[in-house]
Amino acid sequence: MSYDGKILARARDMIAGRRRANAETLARRRAEVLARSPAVMAAEAEITGLISAVASGALKKGFDAGTAVSGVRADCEALLRRRAELLERAGFPADYLDEKYDCALCRDTGYVLGKPCGCLNAVYKAETVRELSSMLSIGDQSFERFDLSLYDDTYDREHNDSPRALAEAAFTICREYAANFGKKSANLLFRGGTGLGKTFLSASIARVVSEKGFSVVYDTAVSVVGAFELQKFDRGGADAEEVASRVRRYMDCELLLLDDLGTEMITGFAQSALYSLVNGRLLSGGKTVITTNLGGEELRRRYTPPLVSRLEGEYIALSFAGRDIRTVKRERGLR
C-alpha cells in the first residue's frame, strides 16, 4: 500500500486523538475512584510500584529481569484481584481502571512491529475518500448509480454506434479497471462533449481505487498547469512549499485523474508542463485517467506532436456521445 504523506499525517493525528481521548477517560475514572474509594488507588499504587521496580532493575547491569518478573508475578496478580474486589465493593466494574483502546492490536499507536496497523489503514482510506469527495463530489457518484437509460439508444453515424452502447462499453471497461487496478493497468482517455458522464465515471473509479488503499489525486488541467507555473516562477512565494508538494503529488500518485484537458490556456509553458506530467508518469509507471471535450482532430491542433503521440499511443480512448445528461434529467423530472 502506498501512502500520500499529507493524508497519512492526518490519519496519524486522528489515531493519536483516539489515544488522547482514552487517556483522558482513564484519568477521569481514576479521579472518580479516588474520591469514592482511596483503598482502590492504594492497591493501584502498589501495582505500579512493583512494575516500576522491575523496570528500573532491568536497566542495571547483572539484573536478571526474567527472574524478577517471575518473583513479583504472584504478588501483582494478588493485587489485581484485590483491586477488582475493591472496585466492585465501591460500585464500579472490576475492569474500570484498565486501559482501554479503540484498537487492542496496536494500542492506538497506529503501528504493529513498525508496520501500519489495520486501524490506521482504515482511517487513511476514509480520509482519502473524504479528500477526493471535497474536490470531486464522489459522495453520490459510484458505478451502482450510473444510469444507462439516460443515454439515447439511437444510432449515431459519427461514432458508428448509439450513445447508450458507447456509454455501456465505457462503463464496463471502467468498472473492470477499478476492480483490477494495479501496476499493469492502462491509462484512459475519456473523450466527448460536456455532461456525458466522463467525470462521473472518473469519480467512480476514484472511489473504488482509493478504498483499495492506492494513492489517488484529482485536479483539473487548469489547476495542474497553474501549479506547475507557480512552482517555476514563484519559488520564493509564501505558498511555495505547498505548491511543490502539489506538483509532487501529481507526479508520484498511483492514479491521477486529470479533468477537463483543453480548458487551460495554451502557452509554450503549458504545453511543456503537460508533456512533463504525461510523459513523466508514463516513465514512472503512474496511471492516469484524462477527460477532455476535445476530439482527435482538436487534440492534434491544440497540442504538440510529442504530447499527442503519448495520448494516442499510450492511452485507451473511450468515446462518449449524446445529449447532456443534466438536460435529460431535467426533462424527465429526475434529480
Image (cartoon, rainbow, N blue to C red):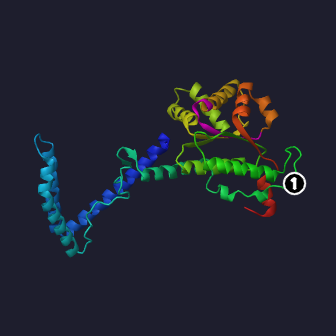
44 lies left or right of 113? left
- Asked if residue 165 lies left or right of residue 16, the reply is right
Point out residue 217 in the picture as x, y percentages from the top left corner: 58, 42
Task: Identify the image quadrant of the C terminus.
Answer: bottom right
Place of residue 211 in the rendered image (x, y in percent of width and height, measured from the top left): 55, 51
Left or right: residue 17 versus residue 294 is left
Q: In the figure, residue 307 lies in which quadrant?
A: top right
Residue interval drawn in magenta: 282-293
User: Which residue ends up furthest to the right in the rendered image?
Assistant: 157
Q: Is residue 236 above or below residue 2?
A: above
Q: Secondary structure at mark 1?
A: loop
One can see residue 297 in this view: yes
Three-letter residue code for mark 1 = Thr
Q: Is residue 203 visible?
A: no
Residue at 59% of width from left, 30% of height from top?
A: 230
Q: Give whichever of 39, 154 is nearer the camera.
A: 154
Residue marked by disc 1: 154
Residue 28 lies in what quarter of the image? bottom left
Front-most of residues 327 and 293:
293
Residue at 31 percent of width and 57 percent of height: 23
In the image, is residue 22 part of the stretch drawn in magenta? no
Any magenta on residue 292? yes
Q: Is residue 68 above or below residue 97?
A: above
- Please tell me in which quadrant of the rendered image residue 34 appears: bottom left
- Dot 1, crowdedness within 10 Å: few (<14), some or many (≥20)? few
Give the percent coordinates (x, y) of residue 157. 89, 46
Residue drawn 65% across and 39% down?
Answer: 186
Q: Nearer the viewer, residue 132 or 70?
A: 70
Q: Residue at x 74, y 29 (%)?
A: 303
Task: Indicate the position of residue 53 as horizontal and vertical percent values.
Answer: 13, 51
The total of numbered circles placed on residues is: 1
